[in-house]
Amino acid sequence: MWRAWVNVRRNNGAAGIDKTTLAMVEQYGVARLLAELADDLRDGGYRPLAARRVFIPKPGTAEQRPLSIPTVRDRVVQAAMKIVLEPIFEADMLPCSFGFRPKRAAHDALQVLIDESWRGRRWVVETDIANCFEAIPHDKLMQAVEERVCDQAVLKLLRAMLRAGVMDGGQVRKPVTGTPQGGVVSPLLANIYLHRLDRAWDVRRHGVLVRYADDLVVMCKSRQQAEAALVWLRLLLADLGLEPKAAKTRIVHLQVGGDGLDFLGFHHRLVRSQGRVGAKGVIFLARWPSKKAVQHARDRIRELTARRRLLHRVDWIVEDLNRFLRGWAAYFRYGNSADQFDKINRYTRMRMAILIAKRHRRSRRFGWYVVAFASANQLGLIDLTTHGTVAAPRPFRAWRDRPNAGGERRR
């Protein structure tokens, strides 16, 4: 329970329907709350409350993603449940699954695409599961959990969590499907359920499956294999009560000059390197931030330099920008991202020039002068082209082994 509290406190989430914040819990007494929770769990008196439903925008789209926020008490119990269950099911998880697993990251999944394209698997099925977290049937999910867990107290507690429902518009809804996004234990439950898809997959017949939570790609050697893989994928998902999202499902042939695909924030495309004069370059799978990822960065930069912040101190705005840019670059630096980093650099400085010009009621040229020349370090804005950019990924070489190097190959 203490480990669960530490994890919940570190995430610093919002209050649930009881409006109890983390600060209020600390004022009440963490040890006191955990002791009460432990007693309720021990004597069977614990009852989770409905989660608070909010909607957040999906980056790069006009869609909104439903997010469920449990109360602090319920988040602690869910985190404790995850601590207990995760090692049990992690022992069975397969290498094709990467999302929300310990010691695995999105770049591990991206490395598989590099390796398999080098092996000749250049027909790709790309899709994601429609409303995955909201559509998982509770009865089938519990069957998957019961394959490894027989403790009735744990199973009863898990059923209570699933049946707690969500409060939306002042009314509590208790659906019979779904592990609401926002719950601490929800990603683990989704992986437990989708493990049934992973273990039914046959690499020899249908190609290499790469699954990051509900995002999927399958690397195949021929169009026939890719078409068969898509048919088999639809059948497996239908058996689970799920289906692929039609708008994001397609087969892509990776070839020089052809189309690419977007996966985990990157755009992937087969390119030919610039060889010596008279020599052919090497063909490899390059990746750089997708259009959605770049647009998300531009939107966030525009928000941080909006007119409503004209009266804020410049160093505060620069600090906010640098915090976002560091996080964005830390993810996308493992790729052929130099050109996109240049564009984001220029856009950030342009937005700061516009902000300064409006503040002083001067021309944009004045703003550019202040940013580029009047300040010795461009107001302290970090330069993405030199801030942690690393060499591009290489086949059969783990991304964590790539040394920091400013000289990435540009495309």
Image (cartoon, rainbow, N blue to C red):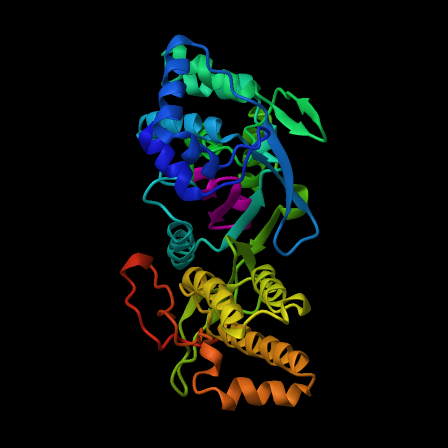
> Viewed as shown, does residue 126 lie left or right of 200?
right
**Pick the front one: 36 or 78:** 36
**Pick the front one: 110 or 376:** 376
In the picture as drawn, the residue positioned furthest to the front comes out as 27
Q: Is residue 293 above or below residue 409?
A: above
Q: Is residue 219 magenta?
A: yes
Q: Is residue 283 above or below residue 264?
A: below
Q: Is residue 270 above or below residue 32?
A: below
In terms of image quadrants, where is residue 383?
bottom left
In terms of image quadrants, where is residue 282?
bottom left
Residue occupying the point 65% across, 83% down: 360
Res 93 visible: no
**Pick the front one: 199 or 33:** 33
Res 181 visible: yes
| Percent x, y of residue 27 | 43, 34
Residue occupying the point 39% across, 76% down: 386
| Percent x, y of residue 149 | 37, 16
- Total marks shown come to 0
**Pick the front one: 255 or 288:** 288
Q: Is residue 411 magenta?
A: no
Residue occupying the point 35% across, 76% down: 406
| Percent x, y of residue 131 | 62, 36
| Percent x, y of residue 346 | 55, 78
> Viewed as shown, does residue 225 lie left or right of 107?
right
Q: Quadrant of the N terminus?
A: top left
Residue occupying the point 68% across, 79% down: 358
Instruction: Report the magenta residues as a range.
Output: 204-226
